[in-house]
Image (tube, grey):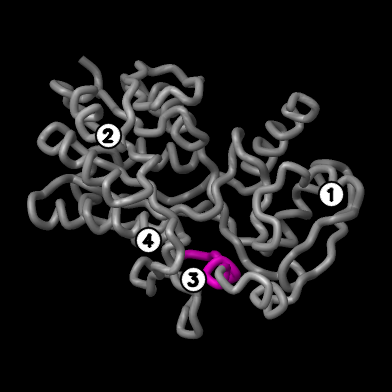
Amino acid sequence: MGKLALIIGGSGFLGSAITAQLTRDGWDTHVLSRGNKPVTQGGTVILADRSVPEKLQAALEGRHYDLVVDCAGYNEPDAANALHSLKGRCGHYVFISTDYVYASNKQMAFPITESAATQRDTAYAAGKLDCERLLLDAWDSGRFPATVLRPPHILGAGKELGSDQVLGRDTGLLAKIRSGEGLKLLNEGQMLIQPVWTREIANCIAHIAGMEQSFGHIFNFTGPDAVTAKRYYEIVAGLLGVELQFSSVLLHTFLQHKPNDVHYARHRIYDTSRLTQVTGYKPQLKLEDAIKETLDWMISKEGTG
């Protein structure tokens, strides 16, 4: 019997890419889904709502997985229910967290390391931190084999482009760039970002699966290329065959209108050396290729909504 993986949230943007990569690598895959989205990348579908403990327990009863990848844990009960259902029946549990757990403050040093200060001002960050803590406590107290990945802006087919803090992911981005009107970037587009491709995340998970030295660790996980937001959009504009035009929003003006976004309005560049030192994995997939795949997907969806 081959290796068996469970992808929680495997019908989503990131989960489907991970499912596809593991399948290509010879894994048998199960996808846990509530059934709200079609599963497009194969795998045996297990229908259950993870937020209902008894339903999750029943769905996973009697199953043992070599690898579990959790792409859909957003609060402490999500992690607690998974722990209850999978403790003793999981060879390795990889939790997808977020770089938004890091706090933006005057003491922040770049590139950001895993030991940097975190913030609980946003519900999203607080929920992810609660999941991280519960899983790593389970490793410390009972050797539950958990690893945490903190990716930043994720690229790939299935989600729109748009990483600047002013607009974010934007369904109207291509029209703005083609027309030269409506694109707004923070601080002249000079904020640094370090996106990661879904394929890179999937490759890394396939590489570290079952790797005992990764248990109990938090890893920053980005692509290899750090660029300004302006450069990010210049790549998009170049692929569309136009020159980039944008207006600038000053940081202090942005924060006057959106003070709760202070933790998002910062450079998003990260030190990934711990990942390489512990696991041997070094990010390598180029930003331009990730943007092109995402752009091609967006173009394919134009006029279909």
Label 2 – label 3 distance at C-alpha = 39 Å
Label 3 – label 1 distance at C-alpha = 30 Å
Tag 3 residue: 111
Tag 2 residue: 52
Q: Secondary structure at mark 3?
A: loop
- Left or right, 214 with respect to 25, comes to left
Residue appearing at x 16%, y 39% in the figure: 84
Q: Which residues are magenta?
A: 261-270
Q: Residue 265 in magenta?
A: yes
Label 1 – label 2 distance at C-alpha = 44 Å
Which secondary structure dominates the residues rendered in magenta? loop
- Left or right, 260 with respect to 24, comes to right
Tag 1 residue: 177
Mark nearest the camera among 1 and 4 is 4
Tell me the quarter of the picture where residue 19 sits: top left
Residue appearing at x 64%, y 75% in the figure: 255
Crowding at dot 2, Cα within 10 Å, few <14 / some 14-19 / many 20+, comes out as few
Type of amino acid under label 3: Pro
1 or 4: tag closer to the N-terminus: 4
